[in-house]
Image: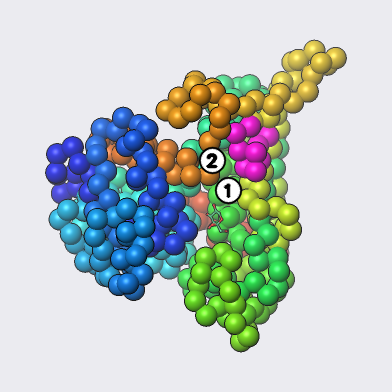
Amino acid sequence: MAGNDGAQLGVGMVGYSFMGAAHSQAWRTAPRFFDLPLDPRMRVLGGRNPEAVAAAAQRLGWESTETSWQALVGRDDVDLVDVCTPGDTHAEIAIAALEAGKHVLCEKPLANTVAEAEKMVAAAEVAARRGQVAMVGFTYRRVPAIQLARQLVADGRIGAVRHVRAQYLQDWIADEDAPLSWRLDKTKAGSGALGDIGAHVIDLAQFITGERITSVSGLLETFVKERPVATEFAGLSGQGGTERGPVTVDDAAIFLARMSGGAIGTFEATRFAYGRKNAIRLEINGSKGSVAFDFEDMNVLHYFDAADDPAVAGFRRIVVTEPQHAYVGHWWPAGHGLGYEHAFTHQVVDLVEGIAAGTHPAPTFADGLVVQRVLDAVERSAASGGWVEP
Ligand code: SOE
């Protein structure tokens, strides 16, 4: 059974590329900055190549390795399985882990299809009755400025939500000679910019506003149809060869949305926005004010209060580094700021606290399915040219 070794939580992680490294630092760091109810132990790292996984385990701080994820899932010293693989293996690994009695943390998007995501939710529901937790890694929810935005909206500070303007802009494949990677292969990634980064802003828009996307009208485009075949995937900047292969996913996704509370939204996800590296931009306008965020200035939230004296009104630039802001009191003195990796640490903190308390910290697999349905609706809408419901 999960959590049966006293105050310890044995962790097994599958995958050790970009996300594996980000998760590893979170498992290493969380117990050093937060007082956790369980002691996470980085028991085993899983990967198919024995030399590469051994090197990664040493570099990232894992005690041992397995070259088969089935062996990792079956180990008695593993209480939680952290899935950091491409989307095509999420369902298989997560469901097997849940059936083996483990808690699961699974990278986003939850799966490559709605059907897979539904099976994962069903497995999580059965496992929840045994006290197991299943969480999906929409990590940006745990950026303090995003938490503050949600709080301001929930407290009515911007009134009724009218507009949601959400963008996720990157440029790492804007160069048409950037190599093919698994993220450009539909069989591995499910979709392109839509699922890889659009999923984040879909989740964030719903998280901050508390509203659901109820219908969408979408457009997908693949600008560069063939790319150099990467000899070996070497991360986002891997080197390509001379042979070219097909890009089978969207390069960019745009959609309009209606939301459950009456708001209307515009969403854009692209990896072709030269100069924008990881620009997650959200602006929400309500009947009493606005909030605005850009991840490239991630410690800041902009807030406009329409009740301010017009003579001096303007967006307040709130530096979200005070001890009363979510998570911040565990880190540095005010003004010293947090980075990309801290949200992963916060994710581990909330996950471990949820496991110990017997709660089900969000985003749950059911929350992941909600996003998956929106992704699917955008694809159906782009194909049909009409409005579609998730
Ligand atoms: C690549 O586009 C990527 O690594 C995404 O897969 C992550 O989810 C995003 O946060 C950063 O960019």
| Percent position of residue 11, x then y | 27, 51
Residue matched to label 1:
202
375 with respect to 310 (left or right): left
The residue drawn where x is 30% and y is 66% is: 54
From what the image shows, is residue 375 above or below residue 346?
below
Label 1 is placed on what type of residue? Ile
Q: Nearer the viewer, residue 287 or 52?
A: 52
Q: Quadrant of residue 157?
A: top right
Q: Taking the image as four quarters, which one is ligand 1 found in?
A: bottom right
Q: Nearer the viewer, mark 2 or mark 1?
A: 2
Label 2 is placed on what type of residue? Gly
Would you call the spot at circle 2 few (<14 residues within 10 Å), some (14-19), or many (20 or more)?
A: few
Q: Nearer the viewer, residue 98 or 176?
A: 176
Would you call the spot at circle 1 few (<14 residues within 10 Å), some (14-19), or many (20 or more)?
A: many
Task: Classify mark 2: helix, strand or loop.
Answer: loop
- Mark 2 and mark 1 in contact? Answer it, CB < 8 Å: no
Magenta stretch in the rendered image: 292-300
From what the image shows, is residue 258 above or below residue 119?
above
Q: Quadrant of residue 356?
A: top left
103 with respect to 239 (left or right): left
**Disc 2/disc 1 C-alpha distance (Å):** 22 Å
- Earlier residue among tags 2 and 1: 1
Q: Nearer the viewer, residue 89 or 341?
A: 341
Whether the magenta-drawn stretch holds residue 298 is answered as yes
Residue matched to label 2:
339
129 with respect to 338 (left or right): left
The residue drawn where x is 20% and y is 57% is: 100
From what the image shows, is residue 298 above or below residue 100?
above
| Percent position of residue 143, x then y | 52, 37
